[in-house]
Image (spheres, rainbow, N blue to C red):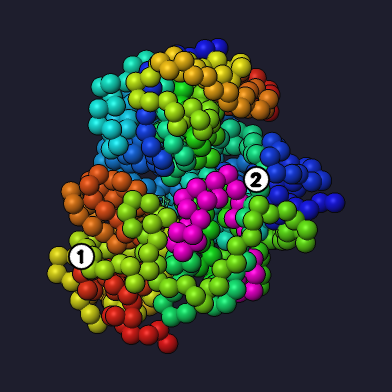
Amino acid sequence: MNVNGKALKYGDNVDTDVIIPARYLNTSDKKELAAHCMEDIDKDFVKKVKQGDIMVAGKNFGCGSSREHAPIAIKESGISLIIAQSFARIFYRNSINIGLPIVECEAAANEINESDSVEMNFETGVIKNLTTGKEYQSEPFPAFIQSIIEAGGLVSAVKSGKF
Amino acid sequence: MSKMTMTQKILAFHAGLESVTAGQLILANVDMVLGNDITSPVAINEFERLGTGRVFDKKRVSLVMDHFVPNKDIKAAEQTKKCRIFADDMGIENFYDCGETGVEHALLPEKGLVTAGDIVIGADSHTCTYGALGAFSTGVGSTDMACGMATGKAWFKVPEAIKFVLTGKPKGWVGGKDVILHIIGLIGVDGALYKSMEFTGDGVKNLTVSDRLCIANMAIEAGAKNGIFEVDEQTIAFLEEVGAKKPVVYKADEDAVYEREIVIDLSKIEPTVAFPHLPENARTFDAIGDIKIDQVVIGSCTNGRLEDFIIAADIMRGKKVAKNVRTIVIPATQKIYLECMQLGLLKDFIEAGAAVSTPTCGPCLGGHMGILAKGERAVSTTNRNFVGRMGHPESEVYLASPAVAAASAITGKISRPEEVAGDKD
Ligand code: SF4
């Protein structure tokens, strides 16, 4: 599977309070959550994001609250992949569990610039910056996690008797 | 040959394995699955997709309505209603709503729902609090919660651990909050990313169970998967008092492998404040300066227990809060509220000019009951000071102990407890 989109770039320690502020957590409606995605860190995010775009960030992305509303809002807004130096662990789990692909790759996270055109192949783990022509090799998912992703998320994996 | 940390031993036992090593992926049985009024509605949707029609164990699911309780608006009321109907349908015994409820991580230990050796998963990041009681507990998302409710299981990657050897005794007004802010300042908000923080050493006995709950609560603020304390007589006495299940005590193997070891001399720790907008921005009073404040919040799962209010009342008793400093006191559970009343602490707070609220997370997450306007500053005993956490994206939160928060309420600027109440006897 391949994803391909424009990069939207953020810094270190992007927390779930800025991804989706608590004042919007009185709903679990995906569309409503997506309408306020990244509002406190990037007011224009909702206007500029396009289906398939790729988020690129520094270290400890998604730290803070365990709210699954955060990866849900990002996924629903159209983001197809997040590349970061590292992720906060609950955010990492939640993204896998809801089927939002996320990958740790320090060099790619550092070197990709805002608006670069980026492509990733999930089978090989290769990330390609089409704007600069540079390629990066990321660690492929462990088999256990791959089986969750292949099943289409944790709920489907449990349903299909994999657990 | 086991060479396991405390956490690894608990995980191995619950996965039915003789031993586990860091990095291994396991499927483990869990003893308790927790959710709140924000995360449970999402989990209920996922649970319904699973189609099992029943929870794995009616006694081992806890639904605690705390974030927007008493319901702050129509949407919040709908979310709570959804949880209430679900709890009824499933026969879930531990459903707590307005009038019985409390902030989840204060409530579960108080109700005896967690014991040493347990695995607890909760769809709330501060689920790591119960490590104070020798449990492996960790925050997960709503999907994990849904699958946990259905199957009684969860997947984990076995973490490596950082060993914190605590020595000495905290002095004066210094408490658990100062200790954990000091540690996060030392290692950073991702200093323990994916790892366990294991607290051992002679100094542990000089920390009350309440201090330990506060410290374990903020393990997530260092990125940790869990924080866990070695069980001692104080832990056992606490568990007996609340009527928890019989504890199972796991000790790390002598030759357990740690990623690193950090020695913390508790007697050297000073009152510590975390500046906006990250808990790692820890400063002591030699580097704080004159910072005027608009609001003080004393409460939350970090510092909303009886011991915290005793300290705050000792500082505020007979004094008045500074003009224009809104001071909001929120006992974390109904029981704590009642005990504060019986000890006369609520009177102390009210006479000092503070507002006292029924248990709720409220302002801690910028939900309700004390939201900050643009440019305003709060000193808060909560655990996060991210951008917009307590209100406007341009407001500021300074994290501190109940002693510092109470002193600051009186002076109107971030202040040392000694400045207001002298040395602690
Ligand atoms: S008091 Fe604050 S940190 Fe604790 S559970 Fe409530 S919102 Fe979360």
Task: Mark 2 or mark 1: name the one nearer the start of the chain.
Answer: 2
Count of residue discs: 2
Image quarter in which the C terminus of chain A is found:
top right
Residue B68 percent location from the top left of the image = 33, 46
Give the quarter of the image for residue B85: top left
Vertical side of A117 occupied by B17: above or below: below
Q: Name the residue under label 2.
A: B159
Kind of residue sitting beneath label 2: Pro
Residue A148 percent location from the top left of the image = 61, 24
* Separation of marks 2 and 1 at Cα, in angstroms: 42 Å
Residue B270 percent location from the top left of the image = 43, 73
| Outermost bottom residue | B425
Q: Mark 1 points at which residue?
A: B292
Residue occupying the point 25% across, 31% down: A43
Crowding around mark 1 (Cα neighbors within 10 Å: few <14, some 14 to 19, many 20+) is: some
Image quarter in which the N terminus of chain A is found:
top right
Give the quarter of the image for residue B335: bottom left
- The chain that hosts pointer 1 is B
Q: Give the range drawn in magenta.
A: B181-206
Residue A99 percent location from the top left of the image = 52, 23
Vertical side of B380 occupied by B371: above or below: above
Q: Is residue B191 magenta?
A: yes
One can see residue B89 in this view: no
Residue occupying the point 42% across, 33% down: A57
